[in-house]
Image (cartoon, rainbow, N blue to C red):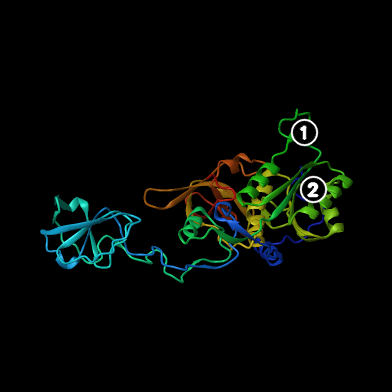
């Protein structure tokens, strides 16, 4: 497993985080392949077209509750009206309601044009066809107007929206059965390191169980990315080269874990430089300094550090927004709040830090945040226990207990839903 350090190489400038992210996003060319997708298969796909309403939703004025449709001009409570019919949901009253008359009406049923209000049934006394109204009802009371939800011609959803369950219900309410969506992104995942063994294998001296693929693949699935899992690749130049040749032939992006530091057996950087190019390598962030971004002939390359927290942080902060742009989805700004530090958050100046923490809301509506454990790049338990990052400025020395810090919530790719 590659370390998150560079003891044996000459120092070179570290690229700031924002510069690295912007460079990656500038290089990301969104997919253009479009599929016709049924609504039931469209969850978490990216919409490839603007959609406008072709009719009002609801299509007619309808009752917001069970009760009686009336003319508001008759409403001088208490008053007695004649019941002349019933209209159920899915039915339509074609007659003309006269002054002094009312209709029994159910929730969702069309309100006839000759009525303009609905009296809830709890405020009515019925005696055969004689209905006594016990409240004053104003025009429009308990009526949901045509187009109240969506007006005909309105933009319903715009291109680039990642479709969620509510979106699909909204489109179904417009009678749509299929929509145009961009195809899924394909990602090949590779882990390198002779010290790595798969969970379930017998552990021998010097070996550790590989965990990065499980984090990365799970996050890719949260992003609705099609995953090509190439497993653990032995630390030989020929094996790694063969894995990358297959990966770049099948995937839009290749995500490797380990092998981008400076160890004698770290071949990934060398091979990528020969097969394609490394756009940048080594960032001014912690954890995650040895992160690499580049190109292969047919795909993008993301080289994650070998340490599990470093791999998780760099994937979440850099690869996730890259994949969103590549998929055609609109960009998202991470949600963050100012929170009071429950403990000291210490750091050395020089690198932007993402420290794992638990943020919580107080009774007065303010936020507080606590560290979730050791902040070493190999301490994955601190990530599992957290719900976000405390982000500490590169030129700062951290924050003292009681000070305000920026707390960024985990996004859907990593949050405990």
25 to the left or right of 10: left
CA separation, marks 2 and 1? 16 Å
Residue 377 visible, this angle? no
Q: Earlier in the sequence, mark 2 or mark 1?
A: 1
Residue 136 visible, this angle? yes
Q: Which mark is residue 207?
A: 1
In the image, residue 213 sits, relative to residue 51, either above or below, namely: above
Q: Secondary structure at mark 2?
A: loop
Query: Is the residue marked by circle 1 packed among few (<14), some (14-19), or many (20+) residues within 10 Å?
Result: some
Percent position of residue 297, x then y: 82, 60
Looking at this view, name the residue that lies furthest to the right.
238
169 to the left or right of 232: left
53 to the left or right of 251: left
Identify which residue, 67 or 305, lies in the foreground: 67
Query: Is the residue marked by circle 2 packed among few (<14), some (14-19), or many (20+) residues within 10 Å?
Result: many
Q: Which mark is residue 259?
A: 2
Q: Secondary structure at mark 1?
A: loop
Identify which residue, 303 or 176, lies in the foreground: 176
């Amino acid at each position: 497993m590659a370390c998150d350090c560079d003891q044996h190489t000459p120092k070179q400038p570290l690229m700031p985080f924002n510069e690295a992210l912007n460079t990656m996003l500038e290089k990301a060319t969104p997919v253009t392949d479009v599929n016709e997708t049924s609504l039931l298969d469209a969850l978490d796909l990216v919409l490839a077209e603007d959609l406008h309403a072709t009719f009002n939703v609801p299509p007619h004025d309808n009752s917001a509750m069970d009760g009686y449709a009336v003319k508001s001009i008759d409403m001088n409570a208490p008053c007695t009206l004649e019941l002349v019919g019933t209209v159920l949901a899915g039915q339509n009253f074609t007659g003309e309601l006269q002054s002094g008359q009312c209709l029994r009406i159910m929730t969702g049923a069309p309100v006839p044009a000759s009525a303009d209000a609905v009296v809830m049934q709890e405020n009515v006394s019925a005696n055969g066809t004689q209905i006594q109204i016990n409240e004053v009802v104003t025009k429009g009371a308990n009526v949901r107007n045509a187009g109240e939800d969506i007006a005909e011609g309105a933009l319903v959803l715009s291109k680039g929206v990642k479709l969620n369950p509510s979106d699909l219900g909204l489109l179904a309410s417009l009678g749509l059965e299929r929509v145009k969506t961009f195809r899924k992104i394909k990602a090949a995942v590779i882990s390198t390191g002779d010290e790595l063994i798969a969970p379930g294998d017998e552990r021998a001296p010097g070996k550790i169980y590989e965990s990065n693929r499980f984090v990365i693949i799970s996050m890719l699935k949260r992003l609705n990315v099609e995953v090509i899992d190439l497993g653990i690749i032995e630390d030989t130049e020929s094996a790694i080269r063969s894995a990358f040749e297959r990966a770049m032939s099948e995937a839009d992006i290749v995500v490797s874990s380990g092998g981008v530091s400076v160890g004698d057996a770290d071949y990934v950087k060398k091979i990528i430089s020969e097969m394609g190019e490394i756009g940048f390598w080594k960032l001014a962030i912690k954890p995650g300094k040895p992160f690499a971004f580049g190109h292969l002939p047919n795909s993008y390359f993301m080289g994650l550090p070998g340490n599990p927290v470093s791999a998780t942080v760099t994937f979440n902060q850099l690869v996730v927004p890259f994949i969103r742009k590549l998929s055609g989805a609109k960009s998202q700004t991470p949600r963050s709040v100012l929170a009071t530090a429950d403990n000291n958050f210490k750091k050395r100046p020089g690198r932007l830090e993402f420290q794992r923490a638990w943020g919580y809301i107080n009774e007065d509506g303010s936020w507080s945040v606590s560290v979730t454990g050791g902040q070493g790049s190999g301490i994955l338990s601190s990530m599992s226990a957290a719900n976000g990052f405390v982000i500490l400025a590169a030129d700062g020395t951290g924050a003292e207990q009681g000070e305000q810090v920026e707390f960024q919530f985990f996004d859907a790719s990593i949050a405990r839903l």
